[in-house]
Amino acid sequence: MAHGSTESAPLSGMTINERLFARGLLGKFDAAARRRDRDTLLLLLREVELSEVDATGCVDAIFADPKRYGF
């Protein structure tokens, strides 16, 4: 498997950023966070195998303190 493969990278044990990077979604995630696009953020997090509860918690944390997360 090539480094940075977008579809078959195993995600278990990776951080959220690592998961997004491995699937080629980090740029889309960052852009959605800057736009405060909750629906897109949730969709992207579900695409990298976060549970609905974990994805919602992540987005809520970003929206509560965007500067902490670089947004």
Image (cartoon, rainbow, N blue to C red):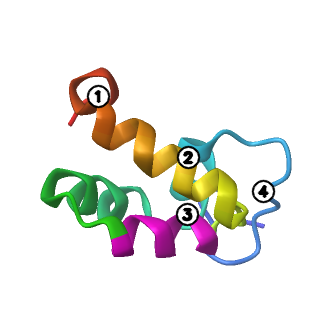
Read off the residue under disc 2: 57
Quick check: marks 1 and 3 in contact, CB under 8 Å? Answer: no
- How far separated are the C-alphas under marks 1 and 3? 18 Å
- Pick the front one: 13 or 33: 33
Mark in front: 4 vs 3: 3
Question: Which residue bears the numbered disc 3?
Answer: 45
In the picture of the structure, the residue carrying the numbered disc 4 is 11
Amino acid type at mark 2: Gly
The Cα atoms of the two marked residues, 4 and 1, are separated by 26 Å
- The residue at 36%/74% (across/down) is 40
Q: Position of residue 68 (x, y in %)?
A: 31, 21
- Which portion, as a residue range, is magenta? 39-47
- The answer to whether 7 appears left or right of 26 in the picture is right
Nearer to us in this view, 8 or 41? 41
Q: Which residue sits at x=67%, y=78%?
A: 7
Q: Secondary structure at mark 1?
A: loop
Q: CA distance from mark 1 to mark 2?
A: 12 Å
Label 3 element class: helix
